[in-house]
Amino acid sequence: MKFKPRIWYLIILSWLVIIIFRAELLLNLILLWIKYSYLLMSEFGNAIHILDFNLFDALLSIKLFLIIPVLLYAFRNRLSWLKNSINFSYTVIVLLMISFIFALIITDENPDFQKDLKATKLLSPFSTVMILHLNKGEKSQGTSIEEFINYKNNVLKPSYDESIVIANSIKIMSDYIIYTQKGIEKKITLSALWVNNGVADITSKTYILGTDEFGRDIFARIIYGTRISLLVGISAVMVSLIIGLFLGFIAGFKGGVIDIIFSRLTDLFLAFPIIYLIVLILALFGNSITSVIIVLGLSGWMSLFKIVKSEVLSEKNKDYILTAGMLGLTKRKILTNEILPVIFIPLVVSIVFQFSNVILAESALSYLGLGTGSSYPSWGAMIESGQRYVTKAWWMISFPGLILIFTIFSANDFGKRLNRSINPGVSK
Amino acid sequence: MNKEFLKALLKRIISSLITLFLLISFLFILIRLSPGDPAQKYLSAEFSPELMKKVTSDFNLDKPVFNQYIIFVVNIFRGDLGISYNYRLPVLTVVLQFLSFTFVFAFLSFIIQMVVSFYLALKSIRNPGGLFDKIVSKFSLVAYATPAFVLGLFLIYIFSVQLDLFPSSGSKALEFDSFSFAGKIGDYFWHLTLPLITLSSAGIAMFYKYLRDNLEDTYQQNFILNLRASGYDEKIILKKHVLPNAIRPLLSVAGIELGILLGGALITEIIFGLPGMGRLMMDSVFSRDYPLVIGCALAAGLLMIISNFIADLIKMKIDKRMIKGLMN
């Protein structure tokens, strides 16, 4: 029998890979979880008070990470798609989902971390730096909350860390260390370093995909960028779906003047080069993550509207809808119970294509500087900043660019497969 | 027939006009809804209250909203779109200056898309499922998924930075004026090569896919089998019978393609620093030149409406059945 890789093999494989490469972080996260649960029981108010997004993210992702195999086993029969055999686009989609959920576990650095620009700026892929850990002074043994916060800051990488020095190379002398940052040599005495069991604590770090012009890890930024892309994609598609369903249902059921008005409106939106419209709205109203989601949602409802309207028109005079109406079902009930199941399948296909359009549009907007803003790492914005260093740093544009192509390609391919499996009549 | 054609034409013109009118109203609503007082964008109230009052009345901001709307519509139809803050010129003049480049650029790209996709589709349909067909089909899927700005930057990196073959930005060389006429045209195309590849690749992939599938479907129909059995030449079958049937659905795609083309032109112009309308729009967005932003958006919408209208006209000319379709 030929060996056929299935989707759940891939999930288990990536799970194992993460465990192998991030064992220390995982152990620390489990400890963090235990300490936090202890804190929750002893000092509930304070524990809630220090819960920020990072901590919440860490706790949630470690819990989810641990129960993945259990979930896979428990739902092995329910989720039949797990047994589909793997191809390129499924692999990309699964990996994207994993990086969306476990961004914190996969990366070993904060996406905004900047330190010692001289040593870390524009490093090529697979370059290694040395990290000198400075002596922070005596650890204050404060209350349990302070201790916990200290521990948390140790485990979850903050965006700035004063207690480390990053150097390109080091030379250890008898009682001091010479380290170089881009050719400039500096001296530091051993006593200033954090000493662990009599040996100075010096670690090395490899940037798999290099760094950008601010010395930020491109790998970490790509992984965290998944969150923005998928979040904007999913939310914008939801907005389009709600508008399309609502307007399409009204236009289909009421007909007449309302139908004509909505159809003209659809033509207007279709007639407009959509990126000009988006740029215009974002320029007038300002850009933030919410406005990007709303604008992209508003610019994509037309195809959904058309599907819903035509399906409602063809279904509304059929016997079962008429019966449902006569039985006294409200319009909302008819929509959710009778019409939605019928249009569900064409809608899903349309949504998948819409999703890839939105991801493309989001990255294009970020590239133009009208995206979600500089507070979140985004693939388009990374490409935009890479453009300025195109002669020096090819890795700044190629990695986010390739990821973007893979994502859009996979979403298109997935939509096509879905369409084919639903309507076998459609060739290709 | 002629009467029917005229009727359809009239109907199509009216529907275009309604769309245009809706577009203008939509723009007005957007401007009114956007935060901030237009007069304050122009002048600070603390600077001089009297001047502020004068600006407010000059902008007709003291009149009711409905009157403002009427004035807005009338001004647009008179070609008065306001004055650009940056250029100190009427918006219409500035937009027309930049529109010509985008128009030529998009038109060239459209022709390239058509020619290349036709050539590839015809070549791959000669041997469906063959090596050429498979490679081009796979490649077109990747090309379709590649965003313009990623492709453009990859091209700049390979051809401008590494190989130093093509310029990475601008539409003409510094010493452009000293060239002969042929040299000027050569220089122009030399500068436009990478932008045209960037802008055309997604369109080529899309047209190729449609055309290839249409050709394949048409070849499988019974009348082609009949013609072949009657001993007609393959070339005649292709030219007289297959192509006309396969092209028709392409025309409706072409209308949608124009919107993608304009959007792609916006991004391509920015990557390569070309003096087109997209770059004008982005520049005016970042310098808060609102009259110019609105002018650009309106021009893009107008271009789109006109080209859709022309696409429909060509469709009516080719396919008489379309006239009935448009009537409904």
Image: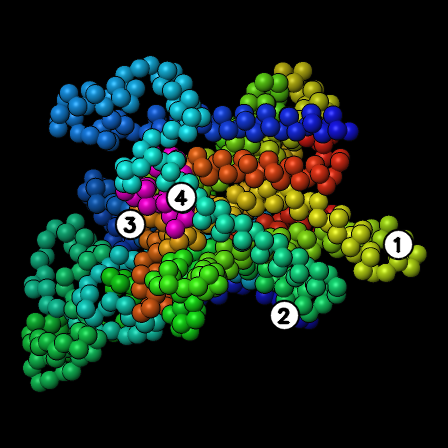
Q: Secondary structure at mark 3?
A: loop
Q: Mark 2 or mark 3, which is nearer to you?
A: 3
Label 4 vs label 2, nearer the camera: 4
Q: Which mark is residue B227?
A: 1
Toward which corner of the image does residue B26 lie, by quadrant?
top left
Tell me the SS state at disc 2: loop
Q: Is residue B305 visible?
A: yes
Residue hosting label 4: B97
Range covered by the magenta-colored residues? B275-296
Q: State which mark lies toward you, 1 or 3.
A: 1
Q: Position of residue A114 (x, y in %)?
A: 22, 61
Q: Nearer the viewer, mark 2 or mark 1?
A: 1
Q: Is residue B193 left or right of residue A192?
A: right
Which residue is the site of mark 3?
A374
Could you tell me which secondary element the residue under label 1 belongs to? Answer: helix
Please report, as a chain letter, where disc 2 is located: A
Q: Which residue is painted at 68% across and 39% down in the image?
A: B315
* Residue at the disc numbered 2: A3
Callout 1 environment at 10 Å: few (<14), some (14 to 19), or many (20+)? Answer: some
Q: Residues within 10 Å of mark 4 (few under 14, many from 20)?
A: some
Q: Is residue B147 above or below residue B51?
A: below
Q: Chain of mark 3?
A: A
| Gap in angstroms between the C-alphas marked 4 and 1 | 53 Å
Q: Gap between marks 2 and 3, in whole Å? A: 46 Å
User: Distance from label 4 to label 2 (Cα)?
Assistant: 63 Å
